[in-house]
Image (spheres, helix red, strand yellow):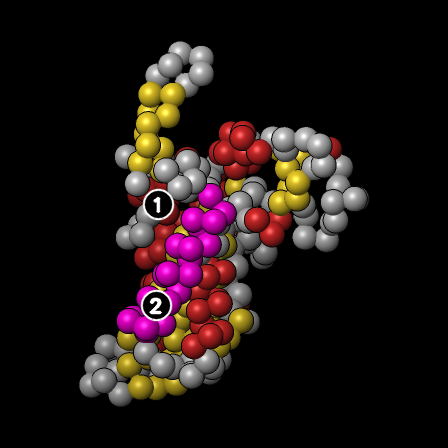
Amino acid sequence: MLRADGCPGCATEFLLAFSCKGRGLCPSCGAKRAAEFAAFLQDEVVADVGRAQWVFTVPKMLRPYFMHHRELLGPLCTFVTMAWQTVRDLMAVAAGEEKGFRPGMVAMSQTFGDQRSAHPHVHALVTRGGWTASGEWIGVPYVDSSAAEQLFRHFGVRPLQRADLLDEDRTRLLLSWQHSGFSVPDLVTVPAGNGRALEALARYCMRNPVSLARLSSLPGRQSCMWLRSSQTAASSDASSTTSTPRLAAHPRTALHLPRPL
């Protein structure tokens, strides 16, 4: 449902969502959307097999490219395709079935880190195994994360090269680093049959940049406080305070606003 809102300065009208008016940043609407997605995933999409959460991250030097070229982060974008190619190739080798082997993966791109900083990355729910061309299930309980990192590093520079965002000198520099900044941890696992844990993990992967659990109201003031995970309201300083009506306009939050269609 939409409603018309007006700018108090120039009286220009524009449409906003009636429920939250937050352009995708409403914690309540975001939590509802994540819960609905997790339930749909569990009930309608995935097979009842074990899964692991793979998190694909890129080095800080490359993050501005993804933040300023959002087409690289779309649901069918190159960034998710890079993650899929890494999963597919590595799992096929581990299973000894390189031809026609097909693992399952549900991937979601995010642009924010713990403190709403620019941190484009992909969360992927990956089956701990896959299906052969004949439909036989082959379990793969362990995948070398360092091998995944090496593979993802090579896949990761290709779309930036094709878009003329990364030249040959910088590419060679990235590929030469011992600690490249690319990483693919996969330590969080969900066993088969544990639908509740799978839904909780899916909700986490779809979480909103602004969380009600991280906000605290300031007594006597029309403002809120964004808390670090280890802080309490009593120990938080003024630098973590943001006016509630202008939360979406805060520089860190504004980074994650979806572009108008």
- 29 within the magenta span: yes
- 250 within the magenta span: no
State the residue at coordinates (74%, 45%): 233
* Residue farthest top in this picture: 10
| N-terminal label among 2 and 1 | 2
Task: Name the magenta segment's main secondary structure.
Answer: helix
Q: Measuring from the top left, give residue 168's x and y in whole percent.
A: 41, 42
165 or 82: which is nearer to us? 82
Amino acid on which disc 1 is placed:
Leu
Q: Measuring from the top left, give residue 244's x and y in whole percent.
A: 57, 33
How many residues crowd around disc 1 within 10 Å: few (fewer than 14), some, or many (20 or more)? many
State the residue at coordinates (66%, 40%): 217
The magenta segment is 26-46
Q: In which quarter of the image is the C terminus?
A: top left
Contact check, label 2 and label 1, Cβ < 8 Å: no
Q: Measuring from the top left, give residue 105's x and y in whole percent.
A: 35, 68
Q: Mark 2 points at which residue?
A: 41
Q: In which quarter of the image is the N terminus?
A: top left
State the residue at coordinates (74%, 49%): 231
Q: Name the residue under label 1.
A: 72
Amino acid on which disc 2 is placed:
Leu
Label disc, if present, on residue 51 of the rendered structure: none
